[in-house]
Amino acid sequence: MLFPLGAGFCIQTSLLSRYFNLVACSTATLNQWEDNMVTKEEILAAFKFRHACKQFDPEKKISDQDFNFILETGRLSPSSFGFEPWRFLVIQNPALREKLRAVTWGAQGQLPTASHFLAILCRKGDMRFDSDYIGHFMRDVQKLPEEAVQKKSSFYRKFQESDFRLLETPRALFDWGCKQAYIALGNMMTAAAMIGIDSCPIEGFDLAEAESVLADAGVLNTASDGLAVMAAFGYRIKPQPAKTRQAMDEVVIWVR
């Protein structure tokens, strides 16, 4: 089956199974990777297909396999020092969605109709160079030897204290984590587009009120985490509007 993506492009639904099969083989050779690579045309087709979908078809649902694939591209996304400041909160409860809708002016059409609704949370104080979380991450997740832990900790401390001055206010540290959350968000929306799924990033909400709704529902501890951004996923119910972008020479500066 092919998904029509506009501008004469199309993308195969077999892309998903192609990658699952390849990733399952831990000894994949370079030739195997090259044989399973998507083309540049397929990637650009996905970018042209993706748009900020304001309303979804409420009758069409994303399969568990497809949404787990989308989440996996978020999990595998890059982060500063590899410390993964995010948590992905998938909100499927209709009552909680309705409470969020009351404080989320930018998702009035998406919250009731999206197949899946995602809130990306970010850690706060845990991202400090001297937190237990960072020590645990280097030793237990990244599996670094103690000598490497000490060296990386030193670099990380300098980066936070003087290079970017992230420790001057708690908000500065949190906003730095939120910047990284947008990397994961972009990857998930692109991955969704590559398998014919629509999405919409959402910043249109009262931050304090939205966090309060999530905290009251018991899914957000505001002492340790904050809300970075939200996103809706599903299948469009209306035709895609024409994509508008500036010309390449208006956004790219070459220094040769």
Image (tube, rainbow, N blue to C red):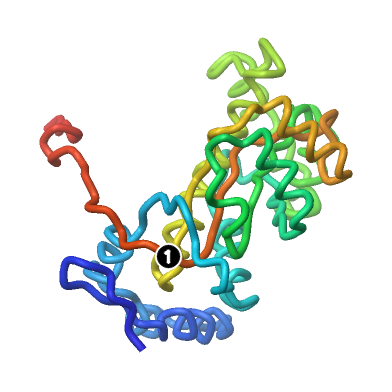
Residue 206: percent from left, percent from top = 64, 27
Q: Is residue 203 left or right of residue 206?
A: left
- Looking at the picture, does residue 84 appear above or below residue 62? above
* Residue found farthest to the top: 168
Q: Amino acid at mark 1?
A: Ile
**Residue found 71% across the figure and 34% down from its top:** 210
Task: Name which quarter of the figure residue 42 lies in.
Answer: bottom left
According to the image, label 1 marks what residue?
237
**Residue found 52% across the figure and 86% down from its top:** 21
User: Is 130 in front, or is 38?
Assistant: 38
Q: Is residue 198 left or right of residue 58?
A: left
- Looking at the picture, does residue 71 appear above or below residue 165? below
Residue 114: percent from left, percent from top = 57, 59
Q: Residues within 10 Å of mark 1 (few under 14, many from 20)?
A: some
Q: Quadrant of the C terminus?
A: top left
- Looking at the picture, does residue 81 appear above or below residue 174? below
Q: Is residue 130 left or right of residue 39?
A: right
